[in-house]
Protein backbone atom coordinates (compact mmCIF):
# COMPACT_ATOMS: atom_id res chain seq x y z
CA UNK A 1 0.00 0.00 0.00
CA UNK A 2 1.66 3.31 -1.03
CA UNK A 3 2.21 5.97 1.59
CA UNK A 4 -0.25 8.85 1.45
CA UNK A 5 1.02 12.27 0.49
CA UNK A 6 0.91 14.97 3.20
CA UNK A 7 -1.76 13.02 5.01
CA UNK A 8 -2.11 10.50 7.80
CA UNK A 9 0.29 7.61 8.03
CA UNK A 10 -1.08 4.38 6.57
CA UNK A 11 -2.53 1.82 8.96
CA UNK A 12 0.42 -0.53 8.46
CA UNK A 13 2.87 2.10 9.67
CA UNK A 14 0.79 3.31 12.59
CA UNK A 15 0.26 -0.23 13.79
CA UNK A 16 3.96 -1.01 13.62
CA UNK A 17 4.95 2.08 15.54
CA UNK A 18 2.29 1.68 18.21
CA UNK A 19 3.32 -1.90 18.81
CA UNK A 20 6.94 -0.82 19.15
CA UNK A 21 5.96 1.93 21.55
CA UNK A 22 3.78 -0.35 23.64
CA UNK A 23 6.39 -3.08 23.99
CA UNK A 24 9.14 -0.72 25.06
CA UNK A 25 7.34 2.05 26.92
CA UNK A 26 8.85 0.93 30.20
CA UNK A 27 12.28 1.83 28.83
CA UNK A 28 11.39 5.50 28.66
CA UNK A 29 12.29 5.85 32.32
CA UNK A 30 15.63 4.09 31.97
CA UNK A 31 17.57 6.80 30.24
CA UNK A 32 20.46 6.88 32.70
CA UNK A 33 22.30 9.92 34.06
CA UNK A 34 21.95 12.98 31.90
CA UNK A 35 20.09 11.23 29.10
CA UNK A 36 16.44 11.44 29.97
CA UNK A 37 13.92 12.26 27.29
CA UNK A 38 14.97 15.73 26.15
CA UNK A 39 12.46 18.36 25.17
CA UNK A 40 11.61 17.97 21.51
CA UNK A 41 12.04 20.69 18.95
CA UNK A 42 8.91 21.66 17.00
CA UNK A 43 8.39 19.72 13.81
CA UNK A 44 9.53 21.42 10.63
CA UNK A 45 6.73 22.66 8.43
CA UNK A 46 7.65 20.22 5.68
CA UNK A 47 7.40 17.13 7.88
CA UNK A 48 4.31 14.93 7.99
CA UNK A 49 1.89 16.26 10.56
CA UNK A 50 0.25 12.96 11.51
CA UNK A 51 2.66 11.06 13.73
CA UNK A 52 2.45 8.25 16.19
CA UNK A 53 3.43 9.47 19.62
CA UNK A 54 6.16 7.05 20.65
CA UNK A 55 9.74 7.95 21.28
CA UNK A 56 12.41 8.54 21.87
CA UNK A 57 12.65 5.11 23.48
CA UNK A 58 15.66 4.21 25.56
CA UNK A 59 16.83 0.60 25.46
CA UNK A 60 19.50 -0.52 27.93
CA UNK A 61 21.22 -3.87 28.56
CA UNK A 62 18.44 -4.77 31.01
CA UNK A 63 15.79 -4.65 28.26
CA UNK A 64 14.98 -7.79 26.27
CA UNK A 65 15.34 -6.11 22.86
CA UNK A 66 18.83 -4.77 23.61
CA UNK A 67 20.58 -7.87 22.24
CA UNK A 68 18.88 -7.54 18.88
CA UNK A 69 19.41 -3.80 18.58
CA UNK A 70 23.16 -4.05 19.16
CA UNK A 71 23.35 -6.84 16.57
CA UNK A 72 21.67 -4.81 13.87
CA UNK A 73 25.01 -4.58 12.10
CA UNK A 74 24.95 -6.96 9.12
CA UNK A 75 28.50 -8.06 9.95
CA UNK A 76 28.43 -10.06 13.18
CA UNK A 77 32.13 -9.43 13.79
CA UNK A 78 30.87 -6.21 15.35
CA UNK A 79 28.39 -6.39 18.22
CA UNK A 80 27.85 -3.23 20.19
CA UNK A 81 28.02 -2.69 23.94
CA UNK A 82 26.67 0.86 24.35
CA UNK A 83 25.08 2.06 27.54
CA UNK A 84 21.88 2.58 25.61
CA UNK A 85 20.20 2.60 22.23
CA UNK A 86 17.85 5.49 21.58
CA UNK A 87 15.10 4.63 19.10
CA UNK A 88 13.39 7.72 17.68
CA UNK A 89 9.90 7.82 16.26
CA UNK A 90 9.97 11.20 14.53
CA UNK A 91 12.63 13.38 12.99
CA UNK A 92 12.20 16.21 15.47
CA UNK A 93 13.25 13.90 18.33
CA UNK A 94 16.78 13.46 16.98
CA UNK A 95 17.96 16.92 18.03
CA UNK A 96 16.98 16.28 21.65
CA UNK A 97 18.77 12.94 21.77
CA UNK A 98 21.94 14.43 20.30
CA UNK A 99 21.85 17.38 22.70
CA UNK A 100 21.40 15.12 25.71
CA UNK A 101 24.37 12.97 24.68
CA UNK A 102 26.58 16.03 24.14
CA UNK A 103 25.55 17.53 27.50
CA UNK A 104 26.36 14.25 29.24
CA UNK A 105 29.72 13.95 27.46
CA UNK A 106 28.77 10.61 25.96
CA UNK A 107 29.96 9.58 22.52
CA UNK A 108 27.05 9.06 20.12
CA UNK A 109 26.82 7.23 16.79
CA UNK A 110 23.96 6.51 14.40
CA UNK A 111 22.53 3.42 12.73
CA UNK A 112 19.79 3.15 10.11
CA UNK A 113 19.71 0.01 7.97
CA UNK A 114 22.59 -1.78 9.68
CA UNK A 115 24.76 -2.26 6.60
CA UNK A 116 27.93 -0.51 7.74
CA UNK A 117 30.56 -3.05 6.70
CA UNK A 118 32.97 -2.05 9.46
CA UNK A 119 32.20 -1.63 13.16
CA UNK A 120 32.03 2.18 13.20
CA UNK A 121 28.62 2.55 14.92
CA UNK A 122 29.68 0.14 17.66
CA UNK A 123 33.25 1.15 18.44
CA UNK A 124 34.12 0.45 22.11
CA UNK A 125 33.98 4.08 23.25
CA UNK A 126 30.43 4.57 21.95
CA UNK A 127 27.96 5.05 24.78
CA UNK A 128 24.80 6.05 22.90
CA UNK A 129 23.61 4.55 19.61
CA UNK A 130 20.87 6.54 17.91
CA UNK A 131 18.67 4.17 15.91
CA UNK A 132 16.74 6.01 13.18
CA UNK A 133 15.32 2.89 11.51
CA UNK A 134 11.78 3.87 12.48
CA UNK A 135 12.08 7.08 10.46
CA UNK A 136 10.84 5.44 7.29
CA UNK A 137 8.35 7.74 5.59
CA UNK A 138 8.39 8.81 1.95
CA UNK A 139 6.28 11.80 0.95
CA UNK A 140 6.16 14.89 -1.23
CA UNK A 141 7.31 18.06 0.53
CA UNK A 142 5.73 21.03 -1.20
CA UNK A 143 7.92 23.50 0.71
CA UNK A 144 11.01 22.25 -1.15
CA UNK A 145 9.22 20.80 -4.17
CA UNK A 146 11.00 17.52 -3.50
CA UNK A 147 10.28 13.98 -2.46
CA UNK A 148 11.32 13.58 1.17
CA UNK A 149 12.79 10.25 2.23
CA UNK A 150 13.50 9.73 5.91
CA UNK A 151 16.86 8.29 6.89
CA UNK A 152 15.62 4.93 8.18
CA UNK A 153 13.81 3.98 4.99
CA UNK A 154 15.26 0.92 3.27
CA UNK A 155 15.96 0.83 -0.45
CA UNK A 156 13.16 -1.55 -1.37
CA UNK A 157 10.60 0.57 0.48
CA UNK A 158 11.87 3.64 -1.38
CA UNK A 159 11.59 1.93 -4.76
CA UNK A 160 8.11 0.61 -4.02
CA UNK A 161 6.73 3.86 -2.69
CA UNK A 162 8.23 6.11 -5.36
CA UNK A 163 7.18 3.86 -8.21
CA UNK A 164 3.76 2.79 -6.97
CA UNK A 165 2.83 6.35 -6.01
CA UNK A 166 4.35 8.48 -8.77
CA UNK A 167 5.97 6.13 -11.29
CA UNK A 168 9.47 7.48 -10.54
CA UNK A 169 12.63 6.27 -8.82
CA UNK A 170 16.10 7.21 -7.64
CA UNK A 171 19.15 5.29 -8.95
CA UNK A 172 20.09 3.71 -5.65
CA UNK A 173 21.59 0.39 -4.64
CA UNK A 174 20.77 -3.25 -5.22
CA UNK A 175 20.52 -4.87 -1.77
CA UNK A 176 16.94 -4.41 -0.59
CA UNK A 177 17.58 -3.88 3.14
CA UNK A 178 20.20 -1.11 2.93
CA UNK A 179 19.13 1.98 4.88
CA UNK A 180 19.02 5.35 3.15
CA UNK A 181 20.75 7.10 6.04
CA UNK A 182 24.22 5.85 5.16
CA UNK A 183 23.65 4.82 1.55
CA UNK A 184 22.95 8.27 0.16
CA UNK A 185 25.65 10.21 2.01
CA UNK A 186 28.24 7.75 0.65
CA UNK A 187 27.15 8.46 -2.93
CA UNK A 188 25.04 5.34 -3.51
CA UNK A 189 24.96 3.59 -6.89
CA UNK A 190 22.93 0.73 -8.38
CA UNK A 191 21.66 -0.96 -11.52
CA UNK A 192 20.37 2.28 -13.04
CA UNK A 193 23.54 4.30 -12.42
CA UNK A 194 24.79 4.10 -16.02
CA UNK A 195 21.44 5.51 -17.15
CA UNK A 196 20.69 8.09 -14.46
CA UNK A 197 23.92 8.59 -12.48
CA UNK A 198 24.35 8.21 -8.73
CA UNK A 199 21.58 8.71 -6.20
CA UNK A 200 23.33 11.91 -5.01
CA UNK A 201 23.05 13.33 -8.51
CA UNK A 202 19.33 13.72 -7.73
CA UNK A 203 19.74 14.97 -4.16
CA UNK A 204 18.24 18.43 -3.80
CA UNK A 205 18.65 18.80 -0.06
CA UNK A 206 19.43 17.17 3.23
CA UNK A 207 18.12 17.74 6.74
CA UNK A 208 20.85 17.25 9.36
CA UNK A 209 21.16 17.62 13.11
CA UNK A 210 24.55 19.25 13.74
CA UNK A 211 26.41 20.45 16.82
CA UNK A 212 28.04 23.88 16.79
CA UNK A 213 31.16 25.19 18.48
CA UNK A 214 28.99 26.20 21.45
CA UNK A 215 27.93 22.58 21.96
CA UNK A 216 24.32 23.28 20.97
CA UNK A 217 22.52 20.92 18.61
CA UNK A 218 20.40 22.36 15.83
CA UNK A 219 18.56 21.08 12.78
CA UNK A 220 19.72 22.45 9.45
CA UNK A 221 18.35 22.03 5.95
CA UNK A 222 20.99 22.42 3.23
CA UNK A 223 20.23 22.45 -0.49
CA UNK A 224 22.15 22.55 -3.75
CA UNK A 225 20.91 26.07 -4.50
CA UNK A 226 23.88 28.32 -5.23
CA UNK A 227 22.37 30.98 -2.96
CA UNK A 228 21.99 28.62 0.02
CA UNK A 229 24.46 29.61 2.78
CA UNK A 230 24.38 25.96 3.90
CA UNK A 231 25.27 24.61 0.45
CA UNK A 232 28.61 23.14 1.54
CA UNK A 233 26.78 20.92 4.02
CA UNK A 234 24.67 19.61 1.13
CA UNK A 235 27.83 19.05 -0.93
CA UNK A 236 29.47 17.12 1.90
CA UNK A 237 26.50 14.73 1.91
CA UNK A 238 26.89 13.91 -1.78
CA UNK A 239 29.58 11.31 -1.15
CA UNK A 240 31.35 12.35 2.05
CA UNK A 241 30.32 9.20 3.92
CA UNK A 242 28.32 8.60 7.08
CA UNK A 243 29.20 9.52 10.64
CA UNK A 244 31.08 12.70 9.71
CA UNK A 245 29.01 15.86 9.98
CA UNK A 246 25.83 15.17 11.92
CA UNK A 247 22.72 13.01 11.94
CA UNK A 248 20.74 12.93 8.70
CA UNK A 249 17.02 12.85 9.41
CA UNK A 250 15.75 13.06 5.85
CA UNK A 251 16.82 13.53 2.26
CA UNK A 252 15.06 15.70 -0.32
CA UNK A 253 15.13 14.43 -3.91
CA UNK A 254 14.55 16.42 -7.09
CA UNK A 255 16.59 16.01 -10.25
CA UNK A 256 18.59 19.03 -11.46
CA UNK A 257 16.66 21.32 -13.78
CA UNK A 258 13.22 20.11 -12.68
CA UNK A 259 10.95 23.08 -11.97
CA UNK A 260 7.53 21.49 -12.25
CA UNK A 261 5.61 20.99 -9.01
CA UNK A 262 4.37 17.58 -10.05
CA UNK A 263 6.13 14.85 -7.97
CA UNK A 264 5.55 12.44 -10.86
CA UNK A 265 7.92 14.51 -13.02
CA UNK A 266 10.75 15.64 -10.75
CA UNK A 267 12.65 12.33 -10.65
CA UNK A 268 13.66 9.75 -13.29
CA UNK A 269 11.19 7.21 -14.60
CA UNK A 270 12.67 3.71 -14.50
CA UNK A 271 12.23 1.24 -17.36
CA UNK A 272 8.74 -0.16 -17.57
CA UNK A 273 10.25 -3.55 -18.43
CA UNK A 274 13.77 -4.95 -18.47
CA UNK A 275 15.55 -7.78 -20.21
CA UNK A 276 17.12 -9.83 -17.43
CA UNK A 277 19.81 -12.31 -18.39
CA UNK A 278 21.14 -14.91 -15.94
CA UNK A 279 24.05 -17.15 -16.88
CA UNK A 280 26.00 -19.75 -14.97
CA UNK A 281 29.55 -20.87 -15.84
CA UNK A 282 30.49 -24.17 -14.19
CA UNK A 283 33.86 -24.23 -12.48
CA UNK A 284 34.28 -27.81 -13.67
CA UNK A 285 34.84 -26.56 -17.21
CA UNK A 286 36.52 -23.22 -16.48
CA UNK A 287 40.24 -23.03 -17.17
CA UNK A 288 42.78 -20.43 -16.07
CA UNK A 289 42.67 -18.93 -19.57
CA UNK A 290 38.87 -19.00 -19.56
CA UNK A 291 38.66 -16.97 -16.36
CA UNK A 292 41.32 -14.56 -17.66
CA UNK A 293 39.29 -14.03 -20.82
CA UNK A 294 36.13 -13.38 -18.81
CA UNK A 295 37.84 -10.79 -16.62
CA UNK A 296 39.65 -8.98 -19.42
CA UNK A 297 36.63 -9.07 -21.72
CA UNK A 298 34.36 -7.60 -19.02
CA UNK A 299 36.84 -4.83 -18.29
CA UNK A 300 37.47 -4.02 -21.95
CA UNK A 301 33.74 -3.86 -22.76
CA UNK A 302 33.12 -1.42 -19.92
CA UNK A 303 36.08 0.77 -20.84
CA UNK A 304 34.78 0.95 -24.41
CA UNK A 305 31.24 1.75 -23.25
CA UNK A 306 31.84 4.03 -20.26
CA UNK A 307 30.92 7.26 -22.01
CA UNK A 308 27.69 8.97 -20.90
CA UNK A 309 26.61 9.04 -24.55
CA UNK A 310 27.11 5.32 -25.13
CA UNK A 311 23.92 3.55 -26.33
CA UNK A 312 24.94 0.74 -23.99
CA UNK A 313 24.41 3.00 -20.95
CA UNK A 314 21.03 1.25 -20.73
CA UNK A 315 22.86 -1.95 -19.75
CA UNK A 316 24.08 -2.88 -16.29
CA UNK A 317 26.10 -6.04 -15.75
CA UNK A 318 27.09 -7.95 -12.64
CA UNK A 319 29.51 -10.87 -12.49
CA UNK A 320 29.83 -12.86 -9.28
CA UNK A 321 33.14 -14.69 -9.16
CA UNK A 322 32.28 -17.33 -6.60
CA UNK A 323 34.97 -19.45 -5.07
CA UNK A 324 35.35 -22.80 -6.79
CA UNK A 325 33.63 -24.50 -3.84
CA UNK A 326 30.37 -22.87 -4.94
CA UNK A 327 30.53 -24.78 -8.23
CA UNK A 328 29.85 -21.94 -10.67
CA UNK A 329 30.26 -18.28 -11.54
CA UNK A 330 27.20 -16.11 -12.12
CA UNK A 331 26.48 -13.38 -14.67
CA UNK A 332 23.43 -11.13 -14.28
CA UNK A 333 22.70 -8.45 -16.87
CA UNK A 334 19.82 -5.98 -17.09
CA UNK A 335 18.84 -3.83 -20.08
CA UNK A 336 15.95 -1.39 -20.46
CA UNK A 337 13.68 -3.32 -22.80
CA UNK A 338 12.35 -0.14 -24.42
CA UNK A 339 15.61 1.36 -25.68
CA UNK A 340 16.33 0.94 -29.41
CA UNK A 341 18.03 -2.37 -30.17
CA UNK A 342 17.81 -3.54 -26.56
CA UNK A 343 18.22 -7.19 -27.44
CA UNK A 344 21.16 -6.41 -29.74
CA UNK A 345 22.88 -4.44 -26.95
CA UNK A 346 22.50 -7.41 -24.63
CA UNK A 347 23.61 -9.92 -27.25
CA UNK A 348 26.69 -7.87 -28.15
CA UNK A 349 27.69 -7.59 -24.50
CA UNK A 350 27.30 -11.32 -23.85
CA UNK A 351 29.12 -12.27 -27.04
CA UNK A 352 32.02 -9.99 -26.12
CA UNK A 353 32.30 -10.97 -22.48
CA UNK A 354 31.90 -14.73 -22.98
CA UNK A 355 34.34 -14.98 -25.88
CA UNK A 356 36.92 -17.66 -25.08
CA UNK A 357 35.40 -18.49 -21.69
CA UNK A 358 34.05 -21.99 -22.29
CA UNK A 359 30.67 -23.71 -21.74
CA UNK A 360 27.91 -21.79 -20.04
CA UNK A 361 24.16 -22.03 -19.59
CA UNK A 362 21.29 -19.67 -18.90
CA UNK A 363 18.72 -17.47 -20.54
CA UNK A 364 16.91 -14.16 -20.72
CA UNK A 365 13.41 -13.15 -19.64
CA UNK A 366 11.43 -9.94 -19.76
CA UNK A 367 10.20 -8.67 -16.40
CA UNK A 368 8.50 -5.54 -15.07
CA UNK A 369 11.17 -3.26 -13.61
CA UNK A 370 9.96 -3.32 -10.01
CA UNK A 371 9.56 -7.08 -10.03
CA UNK A 372 13.10 -7.48 -11.37
CA UNK A 373 14.39 -5.05 -8.74
CA UNK A 374 12.79 -7.06 -5.94
CA UNK A 375 14.09 -10.32 -7.36
CA UNK A 376 17.68 -9.09 -7.74
CA UNK A 377 17.73 -7.34 -4.36
CA UNK A 378 16.67 -10.46 -2.49
CA UNK A 379 18.64 -12.98 -4.57
CA UNK A 380 21.95 -12.31 -2.80
CA UNK A 381 21.11 -14.52 0.17
CA UNK A 382 24.45 -14.32 1.98
CA UNK A 383 24.52 -10.52 1.73
CA UNK A 384 21.15 -10.38 3.48
CA UNK A 385 22.00 -12.94 6.18
CA UNK A 386 22.28 -11.16 9.55
CA UNK A 387 23.96 -14.12 11.29
CA UNK A 388 27.25 -14.15 9.36
CA UNK A 389 30.66 -12.69 10.06
CA UNK A 390 32.21 -10.84 7.15
CA UNK A 391 34.96 -8.76 5.63
CA UNK A 392 34.98 -6.67 2.44
CA UNK A 393 37.26 -4.74 0.10
CA UNK A 394 36.59 -2.58 -2.95
CA UNK A 395 38.21 -0.98 -5.98
CA UNK A 396 37.27 1.30 -8.86
CA UNK A 397 38.71 0.35 -12.25
CA UNK A 398 39.47 2.61 -15.23
CA UNK A 399 41.13 -0.09 -17.36
CA UNK A 400 40.87 -3.85 -17.65
CA UNK A 401 42.98 -6.44 -15.83
CA UNK A 402 46.53 -7.45 -16.59
CA UNK A 403 47.44 -11.08 -17.19
CA UNK A 404 49.11 -11.23 -13.78
CA UNK A 405 46.00 -9.89 -12.04
CA UNK A 406 43.75 -12.36 -13.87
CA UNK A 407 46.05 -15.18 -12.78
CA UNK A 408 45.81 -14.03 -9.18
CA UNK A 409 42.02 -14.24 -9.36
CA UNK A 410 42.23 -17.82 -10.58
CA UNK A 411 44.72 -18.83 -7.89
CA UNK A 412 42.70 -17.45 -4.99
CA UNK A 413 39.28 -18.50 -6.28
CA UNK A 414 40.51 -22.08 -6.62
CA UNK A 415 42.51 -22.13 -3.38
CA UNK A 416 41.87 -25.38 -1.45
CA UNK A 417 40.53 -25.48 2.07
CA UNK A 418 38.16 -22.53 1.73
CA UNK A 419 35.18 -24.61 2.81
CA UNK A 420 32.42 -22.07 2.32
CA UNK A 421 30.19 -21.10 -0.57
CA UNK A 422 29.94 -17.47 0.57
CA UNK A 423 33.20 -15.93 -0.62
CA UNK A 424 33.36 -14.13 -3.93
CA UNK A 425 34.37 -11.07 -5.90
CA UNK A 426 31.64 -9.00 -7.53
CA UNK A 427 32.21 -6.99 -10.71
CA UNK A 428 29.66 -4.23 -11.28
CA UNK A 429 29.04 -1.76 -14.09
CA UNK A 430 29.94 1.87 -13.58
CA UNK A 431 30.47 4.79 -15.91
CA UNK A 432 27.77 6.04 -18.26
CA UNK A 433 25.79 8.87 -16.68
CA UNK A 434 27.97 8.65 -13.55
CA UNK A 435 30.85 10.00 -15.61
CA UNK A 436 28.85 12.96 -16.92
CA UNK A 437 29.33 14.81 -13.61
CA UNK A 438 32.62 16.58 -12.76
CA UNK A 439 34.60 14.96 -9.95
CA UNK A 440 34.27 18.03 -7.70
CA UNK A 441 30.61 18.75 -8.38
CA UNK A 442 29.77 16.29 -5.63
CA UNK A 443 31.86 14.84 -2.84
CA UNK A 444 31.83 11.53 -4.71
CA UNK A 445 34.98 11.85 -6.82
CA UNK A 446 35.10 8.61 -8.87
CA UNK A 447 33.69 10.06 -12.07
CA UNK A 448 35.91 8.46 -14.71
CA UNK A 449 35.77 4.80 -13.71
CA UNK A 450 34.38 2.04 -15.92
CA UNK A 451 33.50 -0.65 -13.38
CA UNK A 452 33.80 -1.52 -9.71
CA UNK A 453 34.99 -4.50 -7.66
CA UNK A 454 33.74 -5.78 -4.30
CA UNK A 455 35.48 -8.62 -2.46
CA UNK A 456 33.06 -10.41 -0.11
CA UNK A 457 33.91 -12.98 2.53
CA UNK A 458 31.24 -14.51 4.79
CA UNK A 459 31.63 -17.21 7.43
CA UNK A 460 29.89 -18.21 10.63
CA UNK A 461 32.52 -19.49 13.10
CA UNK A 462 34.59 -16.86 14.97
CA UNK A 463 37.44 -19.38 15.05
CA UNK A 464 37.72 -18.95 11.26
CA UNK A 465 38.30 -15.18 11.36
CA UNK A 466 42.03 -15.39 10.63
CA UNK A 467 41.52 -17.93 7.85
CA UNK A 468 39.00 -15.96 5.83
CA UNK A 469 40.37 -12.51 6.56
CA UNK A 470 43.84 -13.74 5.66
CA UNK A 471 42.59 -15.12 2.33
CA UNK A 472 40.91 -11.82 1.56
CA UNK A 473 43.87 -9.65 2.53
CA UNK A 474 46.37 -11.73 0.60
CA UNK A 475 44.11 -11.85 -2.47
CA UNK A 476 43.51 -8.10 -2.52
CA UNK A 477 47.09 -7.01 -1.88
CA UNK A 478 48.42 -9.38 -4.54
CA UNK A 479 45.99 -8.06 -7.18
CA UNK A 480 47.32 -4.55 -6.52
CA UNK A 481 50.90 -5.58 -5.71
CA UNK A 482 52.34 -3.07 -8.17
CA UNK A 483 50.73 -0.14 -6.33
CA UNK A 484 51.46 -1.01 -2.72
CA UNK A 485 48.61 -3.44 -2.17
CA UNK A 486 45.77 -0.97 -2.80
CA UNK A 487 44.09 0.48 -5.94
CA UNK A 488 45.76 3.88 -5.93
CA UNK A 489 44.32 6.45 -8.37
CA UNK A 490 46.22 6.01 -11.64
CA UNK A 491 45.56 4.99 -15.25
CA UNK A 492 44.13 1.60 -14.27
CA UNK A 493 42.61 1.96 -10.80
CA UNK A 494 40.80 4.79 -9.04
CA UNK A 495 40.64 4.15 -5.32
CA UNK A 496 37.90 2.69 -3.14
CA UNK A 497 34.21 3.17 -2.36
CA UNK A 498 33.57 4.85 0.99
CA UNK A 499 30.34 2.88 1.48
CA UNK A 500 32.46 -0.28 1.48
CA UNK A 501 34.72 0.92 4.31
CA UNK A 502 37.93 -0.98 4.95
CA UNK A 503 40.08 -0.16 7.97
CA UNK A 504 43.03 -2.01 6.41
CA UNK A 505 43.41 0.97 4.07
CA UNK A 506 44.77 2.94 7.02
CA UNK A 507 47.14 0.18 8.15
CA UNK A 508 50.66 0.32 6.68
CA UNK A 509 50.82 -3.47 6.93
CA UNK A 510 48.27 -3.68 4.11
CA UNK A 511 48.48 -0.26 2.48
CA UNK A 512 52.12 0.05 1.51
CA UNK A 513 51.49 2.83 -0.99
CA UNK A 514 52.04 6.53 -0.50
CA UNK A 515 48.28 7.12 -0.82
CA UNK A 516 46.47 7.54 2.53
CA UNK A 517 43.08 5.95 3.15
CA UNK A 518 41.22 9.25 2.75
CA UNK A 519 42.64 9.87 -0.71
CA UNK A 520 41.58 6.37 -1.79
CA UNK A 521 38.02 7.35 -0.86
CA UNK A 522 37.94 11.05 -1.73
CA UNK A 523 41.00 11.92 -3.84
CA UNK A 524 41.25 15.71 -4.26
CA UNK A 525 37.93 16.38 -2.53
CA UNK A 526 39.27 15.56 0.93
CA UNK A 527 40.51 19.06 1.91
CA UNK A 528 37.10 20.51 1.04
CA UNK A 529 35.43 17.84 3.16
CA UNK A 530 37.73 18.79 6.01
CA UNK A 531 36.63 22.40 5.72
CA UNK A 532 33.00 21.27 5.84
CA UNK A 533 33.82 19.22 8.91
CA UNK A 534 35.30 22.27 10.64
CA UNK A 535 32.28 24.39 9.75
CA UNK A 536 29.58 21.92 10.78
CA UNK A 537 31.15 19.64 13.38
CA UNK A 538 33.92 21.74 14.93
CA UNK A 539 33.88 19.74 18.18
CA UNK A 540 34.24 16.43 16.29
CA UNK A 541 31.13 15.02 17.94
CA UNK A 542 30.54 12.66 15.01
CA UNK A 543 33.59 10.52 14.48
CA UNK A 544 34.85 7.00 13.90
CA UNK A 545 38.06 5.28 12.81
CA UNK A 546 37.81 6.60 9.25
CA UNK A 547 35.78 9.76 9.74
CA UNK A 548 36.77 13.06 8.13
CA UNK A 549 39.52 14.62 10.23
CA UNK A 550 39.40 18.23 11.33
CA UNK A 551 42.03 20.29 9.47
CA UNK A 552 45.09 21.27 11.45
Image (spheres, grey):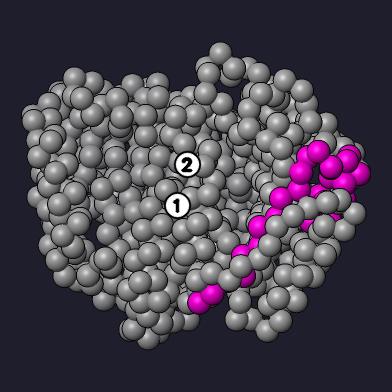
Image quadrant containing the N terminus: bottom left
**What residue does disc 1 label?**
176
Q: Is residue 433 visible?
A: no
Residue at position x 16%, y 70% in the image: 7
Q: Is residue 149 left or right of residue 273?
A: left
Q: Which SS class for mark 1? A: loop
Q: Answer whether labels 2 and 1 touch (C-beta < 8 Å).
A: yes
Of 9 and 357, the residue lying toward us:
357
Q: Is residue 176 left or right of residue 300?
A: left
Name the spot of residue 173 as percent of width and height, x first: 51, 56
**What residue does disc 2 label?**
384
Of 506 and 319, the residue lying toward us:
319
Dividing the picture into quadrants, the one containing residue 354 is bottom right
- Please report whichever mark, 2 or 1, sits nearer to the chain's N-terminal start: 1
Residue at position x 30%, y 46% in the image: 133
Query: Disc 2 and disc 1: Cα gap in Å?
Result: 8 Å
Q: Is residue 134 visible?
A: yes
- From this view, report whether residue 366 is shown above or below residue 125: below
Dividing the picture into quadrants, the one containing residue 225 is bottom left
Of 317 and 540, the residue lying toward us:
317
- From this view, report whether residue 7 is shown above or below residue 392: below
The magenta segment is 272-299
Amino acid sequence: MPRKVNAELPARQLSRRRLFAGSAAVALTAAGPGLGTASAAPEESGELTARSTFGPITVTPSDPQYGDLVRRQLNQRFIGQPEMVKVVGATHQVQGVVQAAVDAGKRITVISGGHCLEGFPFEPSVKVVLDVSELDNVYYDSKYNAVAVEAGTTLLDVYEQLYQTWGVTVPGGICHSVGMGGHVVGGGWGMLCRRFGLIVDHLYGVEVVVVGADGRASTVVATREASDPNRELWWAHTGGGGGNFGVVTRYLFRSPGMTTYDPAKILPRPPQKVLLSEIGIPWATLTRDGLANLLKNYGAWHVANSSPSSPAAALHAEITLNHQSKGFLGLMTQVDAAVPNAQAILDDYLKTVLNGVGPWGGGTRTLPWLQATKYIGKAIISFNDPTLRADYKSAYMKATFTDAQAGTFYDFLTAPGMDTTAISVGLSSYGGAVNAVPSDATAHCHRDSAFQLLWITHWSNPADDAKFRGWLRDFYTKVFANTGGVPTPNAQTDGCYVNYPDTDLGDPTWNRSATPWHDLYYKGNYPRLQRAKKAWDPKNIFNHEQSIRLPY
